[in-house]
Amino acid sequence: MEIVRLEPQELRLIRPLLLDLLESEVDPQEAEAPSRDALDSWLPRTRDTFKGENHVFAARERDRLVGFCWCVIFDPGTGLEGEVAELYVAPEWRGRGLGDQLVEEAVGLFRTRRVTFACVWTKEGNRAALSAYRRAGFAPTDQLVLTWYPS
């Protein structure tokens, strides 16, 4: 067994494995679970480039920003993905629904741009953010996120 780095023209070789991965993540109990052919039609051609965009939605009171939602849209080579990178509302403006409005703007952008996957990272104890994310349609997954930092 050897481990090799694929050349850009060889990236198409991983398509069957990507489809296997997508298929393994579909809940077979789901009433409208997509077929492998449907998954194949959704999966763009894999590229060796990575492109991304930053989008920031802000809540403004007169000439002062009182909150923002920073989201990212990127294409790792398999189609558009999104992330809510940051959500913040100034303490004196919390409890007025600004977080919900900001996250809804991000989700609207994801829908418009036909993002196929979006995520958000937050701490379990951040109840206000969790509530805003859940109301916007984000849901917990059974995935475990591990981080690595250089020593």
Image (cartoon, grey):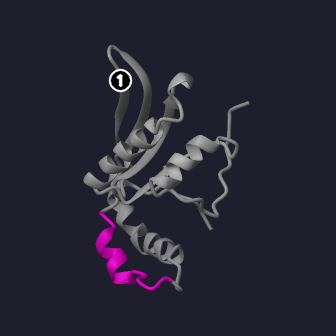
* Magenta region, residue range: 30-44
Q: Residue 20, percent across and down?
A: 48, 76
Residue found 52% across the figure and 85% down from its top: 28
User: In terms of image quadrants, where is residue 114?
Assistant: bottom left
Q: Does any portion of residue 50 appear in the rendered image? A: no
Residue found 65% across the figure and 51% down from its top: 145
Look at the image and tell me in which quarter the N terminus lies.
bottom right
121 lies above or below 143: above
| Number of other residues with Cα within 10 Å of mark 1, as a class: few under 14, some 14 to 19, many 20 or more | few
Residue found 31% across the figure and 49% down from its top: 108
Q: Residue 16, percent across and down?
A: 42, 75
Look at the image and tell me in which quarter the C terminus lies.
top right
Callout 1: SS:
strand
Q: How many marks?
A: 1
Q: Which residue is outermost to the top?
A: 63
Of the pair 24 and 98, the residue shown nearer to us: 98
112 lies above or below 27: above
Left or right of residue 37: residue 87: right
Of the pair 58 and 32, the residue shown nearer to us: 58
Q: Amino acid at mark 1?
A: Arg
Instruction: Give yes or no for residue 26 being in the magenta stretch.
Output: no
Q: Residue 135, percent across and down?
A: 48, 54
Q: Which residue is outermost to the front?
A: 96
Q: Does any portion of residue 48 appear in the rendered image? A: yes
Of the pair 28 and 5, the residue shown nearer to us: 28
User: In terms of image quadrants, where is residue 15?
Assistant: bottom left
Q: Which residue is mark 1?
A: 60
User: In terms of image quadrants, where is residue 65?
Assistant: top left
Left or right of residue 38: residue 31: right
Instruction: Give yes or no for residue 38 being in the magenta stretch.
Output: yes
Q: Residue 115, percent across and down?
A: 34, 55
